[in-house]
Image (cartoon, rainbow, N blue to C red):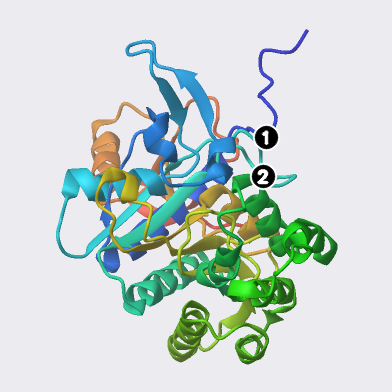
């Protein structure tokens, strides 16, 4: 018989010290996004399933919990990603003609964890810009991700860049024979850089008669080259030599060079890598995509890119680019790297019915100070807050004094 206090696998309570760290990260990232001009939105946790999964691909559907609405009888979903909801807000509720910048922060729920130690309830923060198709929007989102992570305490950022158009262009000659399952197998082999699996997935086309017609030979050669195209910025020059000079591929490589030049100017301390086989884990990316790692982190701290087609199902397809991250995973990564948590200074006060003391406490709290009252009988217990001052009665007046720590 299971204990009532046990939680399902990969779900956990967040205890005070960790919750304090996560809340500090939320505030830092939200403030940074608002400094860039992004407006906060709060989509619901539950929506109609067809709205949640519209245009997102098969991967997100497998990550989404489904349930039946007791009011309408329709199938609902617990969101596994907030981007489709923000696209709906932009398309229908705001319906602006120009540029719209939106940010959000809230839980998402996954049917399966993304990794062995990952939570199935990430706390997702994200920022998205709609209405501008130029690279200026891609650069702004990437710089916001870097600046937000720096505000959070990340000092060793590494950017991993790619572009969904390259693999998309190379796979285009495989249509219409390739189906959703075959496509996902090819993309998984590319992401894993598994040459044997990729050869097997491409075998039906490689063995077909006349495969040199309509660019199929160049397509197969290019796809097999992608897993080897990773490393530093020099990869782009190798890609220009190894991949077919199709317009979409040439433009994608040039766009990546443009992004790199600007990032190196504004963030010269950030390391930049290229991986042309990795599409970032989401099916809806349509252009430049990126992940931001920390040198000491084993997983991406933030990821994003361009997804111009995500609003198509809502009847208003607009250029869109954004990024998201899991605040819980970010907090754990910072903690594991030894980044010190900023202690929140607080004031210790005795509990008393004294009107002067109570008035002094209210005044301090109204000024934004944290005042922790020591309840009777608990004078020697350790406090969660780093109390560096205390209220002390001196000549009938309550005054602040520094606490002398041994």
Residue 134 appears left or right of 243: left
Q: On screen, 362 above or below 304?
A: above
Viewer-side residue, 80 vs 91: 91
Residue 70, position as x, y percentages in the image: 38, 10
**Picture coordinates of residue 113, whole percent (x, y):** 66, 40
Whether residue 311 is visible to the viewer of this picture, yes or no, is yes
Q: Are marks 2 and 1 in contact (CB under 8 Å)?
A: yes
Q: Residue at x 39, y 73 (%)?
A: 138
- Mark number for residue 327? none
In the foreground, 299 or 332? 299
Instruction: Name the image quarter holding residue 44.
Output: top left
For the C terminus, the quadrant is: bottom right
Residue 15, x across and y down, in percent: 58, 37
**Residue 112 is drawn in which quadrant?**
top right
> In the drawing, what numbered circle is on residue 10?
1
| Residue with the most extreme front position | 209
Q: Is residue 391 visible?
A: no
Residue 329, above or below 8: below
Q: Position of residue 99 (x, y in %)?
A: 21, 65
Q: What residue is rendered at 35% in x and 43% in y? A: 85
Relative to 86, is 73 above or below?
above
- Identify residue for label 2: 118
**Toward which corner of the image does residue 350 lie, by quadrant?**
top left
Eyeballing the image, is 125 above or below 358? below
Residue positioned 59% across, 68% down in the render: 167
Name the residue nearer the viewer: 128 or 12. 128
Point out the image quarter for the N terminus: top right
Q: Residue at x 28, y 59 (%)?
A: 318
Q: Residues within 10 Å of mark 1 (few under 14, many from 20)?
A: some
């Amino acid at each position: 018989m299971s204990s009532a206090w046990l939680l399902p696998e990969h779900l956990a309570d967040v205890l005070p010290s960790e919750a304090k760290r996560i809340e500090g990260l939320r505030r830092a990232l939200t403030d940074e996004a608002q400094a860039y001009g992004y407006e906060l939105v709060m989509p619901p946790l539950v929506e109609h399933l067809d709205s949640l999964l519209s245009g997102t691909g098969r991967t997100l559907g497998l990550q989404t919990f489904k349930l039946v609405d007791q009011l309408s009888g329709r199938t609902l979903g617990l969101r596994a990603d907030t981007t489709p909801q923000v696209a709906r807000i932009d398309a229908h509720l705001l319906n602006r003609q120009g540029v719209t910048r939106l940010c959000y922060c809230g839980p998402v729920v996954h049917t399966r964890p993304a990794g062995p130690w990952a939570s199935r309830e990430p706390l997702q923060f994200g920022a998205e810009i709609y209405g501008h198709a130029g690279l200026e929007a891609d650069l702004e989102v990437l710089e916001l991700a870097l600046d937000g992570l720096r505000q959070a305490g990340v000092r060793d950022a590494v950017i991993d860049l790619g572009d969904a158009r390259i693999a998309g262009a190379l796979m285009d000659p495989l249509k219409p024979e390739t189906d959703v399952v075959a496509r996902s197998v090819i993309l998984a082999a590319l992401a894993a850089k598994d040459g044997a699996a990729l050869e097997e997935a491409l075998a039906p086309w490689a063995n077909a008669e006349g495969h040199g017609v309509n660019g199929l030979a160049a397509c197969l050669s290019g796809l097999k080259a992608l897993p080897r195209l990773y490393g530093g910025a020099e990869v782009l020059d190798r890609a220009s030599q190894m991949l077919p000079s199709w317009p979409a591929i040439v433009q994608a490589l040039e766009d990546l060079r443009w992004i790199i030049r600007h990032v190196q100017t504004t963030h010269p301390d950030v390391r930049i890598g290229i991986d042309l086989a990795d599409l970032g884990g989401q099916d809806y990316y349509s252009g430049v995509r990126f992940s931001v790692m920390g040198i000491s982190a084993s997983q991406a701290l933030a990821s994003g890119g361009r997804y111009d087609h995500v609003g198509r199902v809502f009847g208003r397809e607009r250029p869109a680019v954004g990024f998201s991250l899991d605040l819980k995973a970010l907090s754990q990564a910072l903690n594991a790297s030894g980044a010190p948590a900023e202690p929140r200074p607080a004031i210790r006060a005795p509990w008393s019915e004294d009107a002067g003391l109570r008035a002094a406490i209210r005044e301090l709290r109204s000024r934004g100070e944290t005042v922790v009252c020591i309840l009777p009988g608990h004078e020697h217990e350790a406090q969660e807050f780093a109390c560096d001052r205390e209220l002390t009665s001196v000549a009938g007046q309550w005054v602040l004094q520094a606490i002398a720590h041994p």
